[in-house]
Amino acid sequence: MSKNLENEYKQMVAGEVPDLWARIEKSLPEKEVHPAESTPAQTTPAQTTDKPEVKAGAKPEAKPKRKKPVIAVILPWAGALAAVAMIAVLVLPVILLTHSSKNASTQAETAKSLSLEVNGITDGFTAEAGAVPEAENAEPEATEDAEGRPEDRNDITADPREKTQGAKQDSKQHYSAPAGGESEGADIVYGRILEVYKDSDEVFVQISDDVDLLKDEDGNVSVEAFVLKVSDDSLVDADEGLYKIVAIEDGIILLEKLE
Amino acid sequence: MARIKSGDKEGLKDIYTAYLSYIYTIVYGIVNSKENAEDITSEFFIKLWEIADQYKPQSNGHKAYLATVARNMALDFLRKNKREVLTEELPEEEDVTSQVEEEVISDVGLQEALNSLKEAERVVVSMKILSDMTFQEIADALNTPLGTVTWRYKNALMKLRRYGYE
């Protein structure tokens, strides 16, 4: 008994089309038909007949001209190529050496900052969920973030609620391991909420594409999310609270609210 | 198109006869108004007459070319008149939506089923189905996030399913 929406809808609209020809014809501007343009076949022979005339006068010059450019093009390029190759040979080893030494130092730095973030997130999470007073570290970070930089992760974890009251763009989602999860597993993913939709108890969150959702050992995305209230004209407010990710479909995450 | 280039109005009329409903449907899908769709469709054929000189045979066929021109014209119109169109067409239909219960109401016409949708949902459905636009194109045209567009479309289809439309 199912009806074909697409066909029926198109037929319905097409059936309403009025006759517009009289109206169109009235508004048609007169066309200037250029005889020369309308018959392009005529113009091409004219052009081709022109060429032999020119060639006839310049026939002896035509052959040497073909050879000259080849040499003229190759010689300057050969010089330039040689110069570039020389520079590459001299400079590349130096760059590679400096780069490798930098890498070693940055790796150590990122390892440090990651562990900091992990701790920060867990603190923020428990503070929100269990109504624990704000972490001591939060204050100075929050003042830095007053300029509205959504990139600052530590800030969000310090006081996410303040951020969302400010603006939608500033609201940021963080996902952490299930309540019992320790920072050892590093199951923490950061993402900025792009959109939030709510349908009865289900909440759909679309997060920015650059977020990698970490999966557990079995390959399941079974992390909890703390959804902040996001308000926008085109969006539905989602309740604050703990949500569990139950599905990810077309970049949209389906969350199920935890009691 | 060659006939139009050479100033043959009958050539245009042939295209008009063959593609009027196709073009009108595309345009209507975007502007969602009979009057505006009629205006734009008329303008479309006039424009076709004017730009025929610049027409180059398309690899994907002239039907796709005509559709693209029509779609762009309708989208231009939408851009220029966005505010008015959106505010003007916000009806009190939202209550009707809430009245739609879970059971399948198959003995109902399409118009009534479409009336059960929120205006924003109907716009997305029209653009998708009638104008054959991608979700991204719709999102750009409405200046609405992509997720919102897909969400509205999904919602609309769910509602229409209750009326037996697949």
Image: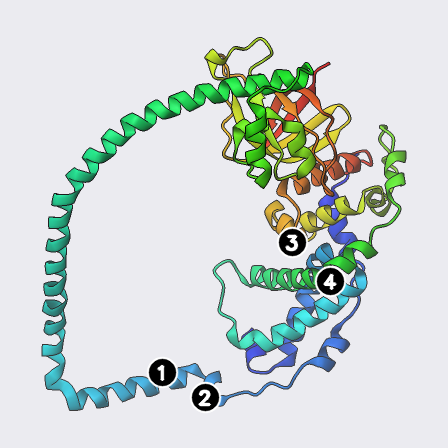
The secondary structure type at the circle numbered 2 is helix
**Residue under pointer 1:** A44
Give me the C-alpha separation between circle 4 and circle 2. Answer: 42 Å
Residue B18 vertical placement versus B145 (above, below): below
Quarter of the image with the N terminus of chain A in it:
top right
Quadrant for residue A61, please give it.
Answer: bottom left
Q: What separation in Å lies between label 4 and label 1 (alpha carbons)? A: 47 Å
Q: Is residue A94 left or right of residue A50?
A: left
CA separation, marks 1 and 3?
Answer: 44 Å
- The quadrant the C terminus of chain A occupies is top right
Q: Are marks 4 and 2 on the same chain?
A: no
Residue at x 22%, y 87% (from the top left corner): A52
Is A121 rendered above or below residue A81?
above
Q: Which residue is mark 4?
A: B81
Q: Residue A70's x, y, as percent? A: 12, 68
Residue B52 against residue B59 in the figure, above or below: below
- Disc 1 residue type (three-letter): Thr
To which residue does mark 3 refer?
Answer: B141
| Letter of the chain that mark 3 sits on in the rendering | B
Near mark 2 (Cα within 10 A), the count class, few <14, some 14-19 or many ≥20, is few
Q: Dot 2 corresponds to which residue? A: A36
Residue drawn at 49 percent across, 63 percent down: B58
